[in-house]
Amino acid sequence: MVATKKLYFKIGEACKQVDIQPYVLRYWETEFSALSPDKSKSGQRVYTTKDLQVIGRIKELLYEEGFTIAGAKKKLDGELKTGLKPLRDLDGEPLAADDTAAEAATEEAAAPAVDEATAKELESVRKGVQKALEEARGILEYLDSGKKSR
């Protein structure tokens, strides 16, 4: 039996693939013009594998790389012109086996080469920013818990 890849994902399935909450995804749809899913006959949002790649990249830009919404919009728009790297599902398998290899090759060709020392320095800065982001999330979680107890 040949396993088939899904062509469309409902909002819950899409959110599970990229590990975000549906309300976050709906908000991103209002902020990122590149993210505009189709709707089914019943009016439910349906996402393609390309949409999932865009969602995954938005998540990376905001949560891992520390971009603001405005900065992420600019970066994403530029990347969409050259292609996004393939998004993998929760099992590590590529979601779109069709044209993602070409997109990844395009992105790699567009990326500037950096020497080893620069790469180590960038990795150190990235880890510092990621740690600060995690601490900020902890503070926000603490502040939100205080609102609930009032």
Image (cartoon, rainbow, N blue to C red):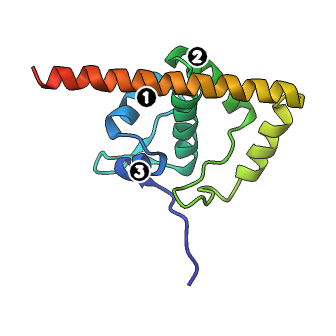
Name the residue nearer the viewer: 145 or 84. 145
Secondary structure of the residue carrying tag 3 is: helix
* Dot 2 or dot 3, earlier in sequence: 3
Residue under the image location 25 percent in, 23 percent down: 144
Q: Residues within 10 Å of mark 3 (few under 14, many from 20)?
A: some
CA distance separating discs 2 and 3 = 25 Å
CA distance separating discs 1 and 3 = 16 Å
Q: Which residue is mark 1?
A: 28
Q: Residues within 10 Å of mark 1 (few under 14, many from 20)?
A: some
The answer to whether residue 92 is visible is yes
Q: In the rendered image of this protein, does residue 74 appear above or below residue 15? A: above
Q: Contact, CB < 8 Å: mark 2 with mark 3?
A: no
Split into 4 quadrants, where in the image is the N terminus?
Answer: bottom right
Instruction: Tell me residue 4's x, y (percent).
Output: 55, 70
Residue under the image location 77 percent in, 24 percent down: 121
Q: Which residue is mark 2?
A: 71
* Dot 1 or dot 2, earlier in sequence: 1
Name the residue nearer the viewer: 141 or 31. 141
Instruction: Tell me residue 44's x, y (percent).
Output: 32, 47
Say which amino acid is labelled 1. Trp
Residue 93: quarter of image = bottom right
Q: Which residue is mark 3?
A: 16
Residue 65: quarter of image = top right
* Dot 1 or dot 3, earlier in sequence: 3
Instruction: Tell me residue 12's x, y (percent).
Output: 35, 50
Residue under the image location 87 percent in, 31 percent down: 116
Q: In the rendered image of this protein, does residue 97 appear above or below residue 47? A: below
Residue under the image location 55 percent in, 61 percent down: 91
Say which amino acid is labelled 2. Gly
Q: Residues within 10 Å of mark 2 (few under 14, many from 20)?
A: few
